[in-house]
Amino acid sequence: MYSVEVFPWNKNFEVGVPLIDEQHQKLVELLNVLAGHLAYQSDIPTLNNVFNDLAEYAIYHFQAEERIWHSFFPEDAWETKHKDDHRRFLTTVNRIMAGKTARPLDEVIEEILTFLTQWLAFHILDTDMRMAKVVLAVQSGVSLNQAKKQADQEMSGAMKVLIETMLSMFDALSSRTLQLAKEVIERQKAEQASQDALDRLQKIASQVPGLVFQFQLFPDGSSRIPYANEAIRSLYRVSPEEVSEDAAKVLEALHPDDLENFKTSFKVSARDLTPWRQEYRLKFDDAPVCWLFGNALPQRQADGSVLWHGFITDITKHKQTEVELRIAATAFELQDAMLVTDANNVILKVNQAFTLITGYSAEEVVGKTPNLLSSGLHDKAFYNAMWESINRTDAWQGEIWNRRKNGEMFPEWLIITAVKEPDEKSEHVNHYVASFSDITSRKAAEEEIKQLAFYDPLTQLPNRRLLQERLKHSIEIERRDGKRLALLMLDLDRFKAVNDSLGHLAGDELLQQVAVRISARLRDVDMVARLGGDEFVVLLEDIAHAEDAARVAAEIIFVLSKPFQLIQSNDVQIGASIGISLYPEHGASYEILMDHADAALYQAKDQGRGCYAYFSEDQTIAARERIALETRLRRAIEQGELRIFYQPQVDIASGRIVGAEALLRWQDPTEGLIPPLRFIPIAEETGLILEIGAWVLRETCRQGRRWLDAGLPPLTLAVNVSPQQFRRGDISALVAAALNETGFPAECLELEMTESGLMENQEHVMELLNKLRSQGIRLAIDDFGTGFSSLAYLKHFPLDVLKIDKSFIDDIPNLQDDMEIAATIIAMGHILGFKVLAEGVETPEQLAFLREKNCDSYQGYIKSPPVPAEAFALLLREQGFE
């Protein structure tokens, strides 16, 4: 506990009443404690707490003292005066404390201390001493009045002067004591602060990563190191004590080549009193050279010496880094182009080779990203794969195409490396370093080698070697995917005559033009190769039908039969014969397919040249017939040989004709009526179905309008729609145009679609169906049950009618499974809100079954086969109008 005796207690302050003396002494102790805290500059809350303790004890003492005096001076003027002294004391203290917010609290406490010291001394030596004398006299038998008189006499005169003198001296003494205490305490604090600062500096110096030192150089040239931290042991291999009087051992450790320069640098710093800064080396026999850097400030001393205060740090690694940086800088400017980016791919630096290759200066690219070099030839997947490799392995290398400043694209070999934090565990990338070289020349050389190895130098077509590799690869793909391919071996007719009559230059020119004409007739996925002389081979991949190969062969024969314009002669005519082998029908290897195509070629030549032949004669005949039929179909469309027949659709409940299905027929002038099964597949394969489908739709609407105009009752006309019309044509626009052109009511038109057509592209089909439905036409699904759809799924389509396929009707009532399937389709169709129509009804038993199962309508030979428009109109008139 802090305490300063501003009120030194002694026996002279005892009044003779033990309880009162004890309490007076306690008040003095608290007063001295408060003075001590003020002298030691304790914090404000502590001062407040001590003062509150003093005030509380003073009030307690006043109450105890007044009880004592009251027992001897009841209702006496002395007692009243004594109480008034106590009240004045409290009033004064409260007044001083009330103004504490207007000035510092220590000033307020100091003022209270002065007041309390004076008041307590005067109160004890005068008032309490006087009343104690009365009490002691009364206790000895003297009357109260007599005792008062005696006490007044004793406390007057010389005694009063003595008390006032003592009070004055005591006041001065207490003030000086407090001031001296403050000065002593301030000095102690300052000394402690200095010691604390020194301790902290020593601790800091011991932790500094380097040598903290003092170096003193005397006029006679001698030197010492008065202070050095522990780092001197590891750097110079000496202890601080060994060099505190003589620095010779430190100088002995210097590299011989640096010693004189080291001494000179200190002499110059001492002469000019300028900071000493020096790089130098230490050399020990058992260790590599160590580089140090010193930095110190000089001070001139009274004895003429100079004392430096400074630091020395080990810069060996820094020096090694400088060497590595110089090496890196040299490597950075070598032949390969280099660029450095930050973690966000912003370019920080490029070398001269970068500028030479790309055409961009450093000023033009720094601050931008490498995207300005992008050629646009690589897709997003390429760059995703590249960055996936960089993120996973911290590197990527490969061939890439970029663009120079002038817009020219060029190939480069690029290496990208991620630079991370030195900590091996860190995943944070600081920079990316990319180096690349222009491989245009190398690519050109590679391409030239490839051209010589895999291409015919005359026609620039693939040669036999490339054909072999491509065919083997194609066979593997087709085998995996279950597809087929065709090999066409082609030999020019009459080429030898041209070569012999016009010369080899003309023959070469002719071969070049042949290569161009053949290539122009092929798809991108196909390939034509020259084997040598006038032999060519065409590889057709992923063909749908065997006849596709014959079709291409016929086109090639046709284009090669046209005259060629050569420099030596105009209108040169040749021909071509083609042999065809198919995978997998005619072989499953390169060698077998080539041999069989060659054999087929000889067959074509034997048949008179200018034609093609399959390795199988049956396939040759079938292909030729199919191609001939395709040619005739095109002519039939042009010459109007197509017809539309109508098969009645009958309401089962009433037995009346309520509609008809429009069915396509081909009336060939020589062969007669050709059934749809023979020509519709060809129309689908060749795309003719689009033209035919549009004609059927318009013609049906036109016929329906004629019947209405003739007074026949309205009925629904159903037109079949090919899946290709959904895929490749705008069926909605076609229907709108047909209805507008013919004036046929939309509600009388019904479009029939197959399950497979609906399920091919469901989202696209749904959009088309909604467009068609918005026009007011009816929609039906044809041949239901033969595809892979389900009634539960079909409920999402805006359909009106389900047509049960004929295959489920044929065996009713003989086959129970078909009866159950038909009954199920009818029941589920009604649940889903569809009308159900049965196709191919031919017997009364079938009709009776359908009537029993509440089928809505039917069509079939039991009513009528498909008939021309005139015959159908007659059927309508025969049933009469209602």
Image (cartoon, rainbow, N blue to C red):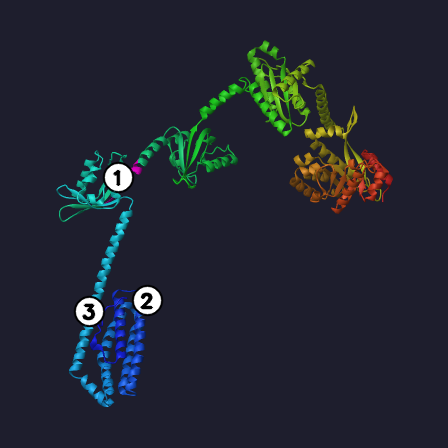
CA distance for labels 3 and 1: 59 Å
Q: Name the residue under label 3.
A: 176
Please tell me whether mark 3 sits on a helix, a strand or a loop: helix
Taking the image as drawn, is residue 701 in sight?
Answer: no
Labels 3 and 1: the sequence-earlier one: 3
Q: Which of 426 and 644 is in front in this view?
A: 426
Does residue 230 lie above or below 70 as drawn? above
CA distance for labels 2 and 1: 54 Å
Which of the 4 image quadrants contains residue 64?
bottom left
Q: Is residue 784 magenta?
A: no
* Residue 45: assigned label: 2
Which of the 4 image quadrants contains residue 817?
top right
How crowded is the residue under tag 3: few (<14 C-alpha within 10 Å), some, or many (20+)? Answer: few
Does residue 822 lie above or below 669 as drawn? below
Q: How many marks?
A: 3
Q: What residue type is labelled 1?
A: Leu
**Residue 860, how many percent across, how many down?**
82, 36
Q: Which of 226 and 768 is in front in this view?
A: 226
Question: Which residues make up the magenta segment?
Answer: 310-319
Q: Name the residue under label 1.
A: 292
**Residue 220, how many percent across, how many down?**
12, 42
Location of the C terminus by quadrant is top right
CA distance for labels 2 and 3: 26 Å
Please tell me whether mark 1 sits on a helix, a strand or a loop: strand
